[in-house]
Amino acid sequence: MTTDPLLLTGEVEDATSRLLRTAAAFDEADLAAASLLPGWTRGHVLAHLARNADGFVNLLTAARTGEPRPMYASPAVRAADIEAGAARAPDAHLDDLRRSADRFAEAVAAMPAAAWTATVETPGGPKVAAELVWCRLRELEVHHVDLAAGRRAADWPDAFAHRLLHEVATDLVGRPGVPAMVLRFDGSRHELVIGERAQAPVVAGPAPHLAAWLIGRGGAEPLTVTPDGPLPNPPEWM
């Protein structure tokens, strides 16, 4: 998958359209049902995605203007905004998702070329502005699965799954306490090594399933472990 933020905008638009179609089918009972995220309903997930879009607008604006601006006013405000929006009516959720997605698209379109090289402060640390479009795409694809409404990790485009898998594996390499493992894509000799290769189990399977398992969105099927044994237990990632 390309790293060019402007080329990624088409992927974001497609992912947004898929999310909106799913959200448009929800009634009040659907929104109140549990998502795959502990303690969150589907309404919480949709409210988070809308506020997440606005958070990225804040960061893009900071990159464009040079004026520091946080993604969220504070963790407490972020949590309160999600909680306040979770129980809204279906039409209100859908309107918020559409409007916030439009604001994100407008902020991307307003970015001059030089602004993409600016560094902005995210809750997870500093990032180059050019990474923000990918970050939004990741939020859309992963949290669409969290809605437990028919979209599965197996439905992720291959390019997205491969980039997500590489990103997570790279992040885990630098973290303490991560079990050693070798990740092998089905039908490929390409491997990602985490930790010391000697004695590390090889976990093999399709890239979307490997990525979903690493971020806590998938189980053992259809992954295999060599030598035979349980899957390693990676830490919580996102």
Image: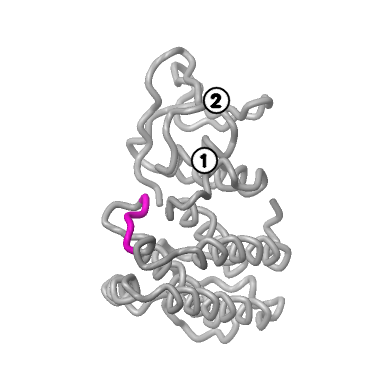
Q: Position of residue 183 (x, y in %)?
A: 54, 29
The range drawn in magenta is 32-36
Q: Is residue 194 left or right of residue 45?
A: right
Q: Quadrant of residue 111?
A: bottom right
Element class at badge 1: helix
Whether the magenta-drawn stretch holds residue 59 is answered as: no
Under mark 2, the amino acid is: Ala
Mark 1 near mark 2, Cβ–Cβ under 8 Å? no
Q: Position of residue 238 (x, y in %)?
A: 40, 52
Residue at 55 percent across and 67 percent down: it is: 20
Q: Position of residue 61 (x, y in %)?
A: 55, 82
Element class at badge 2: strand
Q: Examine the residues drawn in magenta and state their main secondary structure.
A: loop
Residue at 46 percent across and 56 percent down: it is: 143
Q: Quadrant of residue 207?
A: top right
Q: Is residue 32 left or right of residue 16?
A: left
Under mark 1, the amino acid is: Ala
Residue at 46 percent across and 20 percent down: it is: 201
Q: Which mark is residue 164?
A: none
Pointer 2: what residue? 204
**Image position of 84 with respect to 225: above or below:** below
Q: Residues within 10 Å of mark 2 (few under 14, many from 20)?
A: many
Q: Is residue 156 left or right of residue 41?
A: right
**Image position of 230 with respect to 105: above or below:** above
133 vs 118, nearest the viewer: 133
**Image position of 212 with respect to 97: above or below:** above
39 vs 150, nearest the viewer: 150
Q: Which mark is residue 211?
A: 1
Residue at 68 percent across and 26 percent down: it is: 188
| First in residue order: circle 1 vs circle 2 | 2
Disc 1 to disc 2, how far (Cα)?
A: 11 Å
Q: Position of residue 112 (x, y in %)?
A: 69, 81
